[in-house]
Image: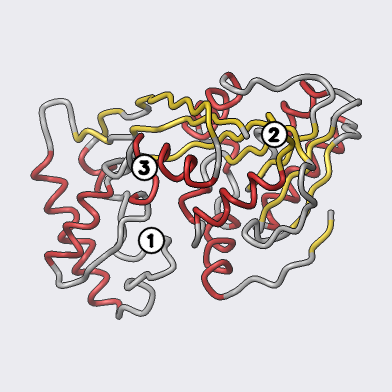
């Protein structure tokens, strides 16, 4: 495992956020999402695969089993803690066709036509420049190669309630899911980068939550975005945001609880 990129301030925040998720593999949702992603991948033996934001290897390790010893998986991530977990699993399996690289995925320098597949499971929304990333991935792919990623609808993960609570407190919070927040937006960005044969599958991972559990989703500070107005807020303002979010959640409650929408797009395309 090697490291050749120094993180800027925003990417360090992203790394810190994911590094703090020490029980990442223990999440039922994370595993369901990864399994669904894997089911949609048309990987073949001998493929060379680039796994962007590989994390603990939930995609990379099964992908390596599929492509076999004739193939290879290169997993990149900026979260060193997650990469160490991935390496432990790789070592335990004695997998010899996976390479991990600690690096900011927006500063990769692979040669053109290097990979048969470029994958990115649940991380593309934190990229500062998604169109530029797609163009890079297009370059990295061999002709006919596949790109696969997933994204969330603009309305997913309590985002409307979070943004509304901020607005009610005089804070304009950007929606991190907006760039890829509809099927059309996913298709448009891929088309602009040169991809075709685009397929989008929409899945709902949402569920009803207890009101008290739903209130814990936003604490007045947890948000990832290059332009994040919550970073420097005083504690009193964060408490105000938390209380306003709780008030909004109470207003959303039904006899079943609070609906937690997790509309997810799984996207495949070819070069």
Between residue 214 and residue 77, name the one nearer to us.
77
Along the polypeptide, which appears first: circle 3 or circle 2?
2
Depth check, mark 3 against mark 1: the one in front is: 3
Judge whether 65 appears above or below 90 on screen. above
Separation of disc 3 and disc 1 at Cα?
A: 25 Å
115 relative position to 135: left or right: right
Q: Position of residue 133 (x, y in %)?
A: 57, 53
Would you name the residue on which mark 3 appears? 185
Q: Residue at x 42, y 40 (%)?
A: 186
* Mark 1 element type: loop
Between residue 133 and residue 169, name the one nearer to us.
133
Judge whether 104 appears above or below 61 on screen. below
Q: Is residue 55 visible?
A: no
Would you name the residue on which mark 2 appears? 117
Along the polypeptide, which appears first: circle 3 or circle 1?
3
Between residue 243 and residue 108, name the one nearer to us.
108
Separation of disc 3 and disc 2 at Cα?
A: 21 Å
Along the polypeptide, which appears first: circle 1 or circle 2?
2
Q: Residues within 10 Å of mark 1 (few under 14, many from 20)?
A: few
Separation of disc 1 and disc 2 at Cα?
A: 33 Å
The quarter of the picture where the C terminus appears is: top right
Tell me the tag on residue 222.
Answer: 1
Between residue 204 and residue 27, name the one nearer to us.
204
Q: Position of residue 257 (x, y in %)?
A: 18, 31
Q: Position of residue 107 (x, y in %)?
A: 67, 62
Judge whether 101 appears above or below 118 on screen. below
* Mark 3 element type: helix
Q: Residue at x 59, y 41 (%)?
A: 120
| Colouring | secondary structure
213 relative position to 38: left or right: left
């Amino acid at each position: 495992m090697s490291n050749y990129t120094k993180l800027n301030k925003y990417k360090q925040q992203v790394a810190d956020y994911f590094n703090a998720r020490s029980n990442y593999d223990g999440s039922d949702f994370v595993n369901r999402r990864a399994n669904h992603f894997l089911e949609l991948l048309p990987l073949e033996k001998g493929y060379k695969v680039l796994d962007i934001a590989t994390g603990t290897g939930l995609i990379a390790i099964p992908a390596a089993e599929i492509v076999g010893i004739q193939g290879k998986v290169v997993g990149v991530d900026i979260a060193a803690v997650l990469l160490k977990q991935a390496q432990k699993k790789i070592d335990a399996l004695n997998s010899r066709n996976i390479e991990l690289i600690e690096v900011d995925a927006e500063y990769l320098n692979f040669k053109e036509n290097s990979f048969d597949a470029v994958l990115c499971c649940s991380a593309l929304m934190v990229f500062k420049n998604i169109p530029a990333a797609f163009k890079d991935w297009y370059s990295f792919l061999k002709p006919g190669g596949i790109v696969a990623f997933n994204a969330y609808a603009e309305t997913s993960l309590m985002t409307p309630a979070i943004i509304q609570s901020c607005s009610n407190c005089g804070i304009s919070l950007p929606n991190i899911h907006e760039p890829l927040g509809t099927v059309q937006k996913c298709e448009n960005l891929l088309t602009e980068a040169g991809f075709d044969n685009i397929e989008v599958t929409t899945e709902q991972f949402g569920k009803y939550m207890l009101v008290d559990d739903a209130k814990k989703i936003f604490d007045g500070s947890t948000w990832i975005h290059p332009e994040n107005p919550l970073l420097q807020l005083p504690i009193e303002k964060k408490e105000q945001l938390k209380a306003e979010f709780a008030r909004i959640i109470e207003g959303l409650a039904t006899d079943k609880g609070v609906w937690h929408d997790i509309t997810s797009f799984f996207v495949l395309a070819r070069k």
